[in-house]
Image (cartoon, rainbow, N blue to C red):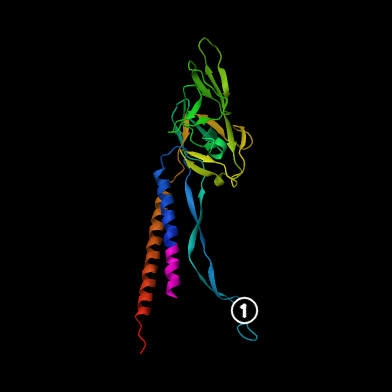
Amino acid sequence: MSYIALNTAATGLSALSTSLDVTANNLANANTTGFKSSRVNFEDLFYQEFAQPGAPSSSTLQRPTGLYVGLGTDVSGTQLNFSQGATQVTDLPLDMMIEGDGFFEVEIPDDIAQGQGFTRAGNFALNADGEIVMANSPGFRLRSDVTIPSDASQIAVALDGTVTGMLPGGTEPTEFGTIMLTRFINPAGLQTRGNNVYTKTEASGEPLTTDAGQEGAGFIRQGALEASNVDPVTELVTLIKTQRVFEMNSQVLQAANETLKNISNIRTF
């Protein structure tokens, strides 16, 4: 019946509207440091069964196929893409990027995921206490034992996360601490919190903290940032496809409406 097509097309329009929102967010963050794009996963809904495959069609024959009518689609979820973003060389001493897997762990409010946040954005700065903090609006503190004195110079971050610098009167670099990295068995299961921060969930698993370059974690590269991994061309193609499918579902909606209108106008003589 046409009312099935009407409802099915409506589910398509609703799901495609969500897809459009996700694509818009990806494009809006094409220049956000360390941003990871998302994709929308769709799934089909229930089916009305009118005949089962293999059901007897006569005393000696069976149906080779069934008869099912689908009831539309829905968004099953959004999936984060943690592929490596491009390298942006800045030559700033507190800009760092992770080459490979892993996250920087930062301290967020205690009422959110026990105060544990994780980020790929390595644009850092120093606070008044010489601690490394994210250069974003909240200024979350990097969870590490690193404190850089105000009179230190020539700050260097090694590939393994060791932070050193020169102090007045010194002839050799002084070690100020080590930046650790955190990995997850399922990073796609992390929860996005805004401000370039993710938090753990049951799906992501527990955080695994390790030295940079060890146990599958990447290396830390100083003086560079990881750009957003959004591919504008791919997103624009997705946008065009979404728009076209949206138009086709709208046409199905109109056709079903016309059919129902014709049925309602039938007169019995």
Determine if residue 232 is in view: no
Tell me if residue 131 can be seen: yes
Which region is colored magenta?
1-11
Q: What is the total number of numbered labels drawn onto the structure image?
A: 1
**Residue 193 vs residue 242, the one in the foreground:** 193
Query: Considering only vertical position in the picture, is 207 above or below 238?
Result: above
Quadrant of residue 190 in the image? top right
Q: Mark 1 points at which residue?
A: 55
Q: Residues within 10 Å of mark 1 (few under 14, many from 20)?
A: few
Residue drawn at x 52%, y 14% is: 167
* Rendered location of residue 41, percent (x, y): 50, 55
For image coordinates 56% across by 40% down, the residue present is 113
Residue displayed at 40% across by 54% down: 239
Residue type at the position of mark 1: Ala
Q: What element carries label 1?
A: loop
Q: Position of residue 231 (x, y in %)?
A: 44, 46
Query: What's the residue at 57%, 37% (across, down)?
Result: 114
The residue lying furthest to the bottom in this view is 269
Q: Would you place residue 59 above or below residue 207 in this image?
A: below
Residue 25 position, x and y percent, is 42, 47
Outermost top residue: 169
- Residue 251 coordinates in the image, percent (x, y): 37, 67
Residue 10 lies in the magenta-colored region: yes
22 drawn magenta? no
Q: In which quarter of the image is the C terminus?
A: bottom left
Image quarter in which the N terminus is found:
bottom left
Main secondary structure along the magenta-highlighted residues: helix
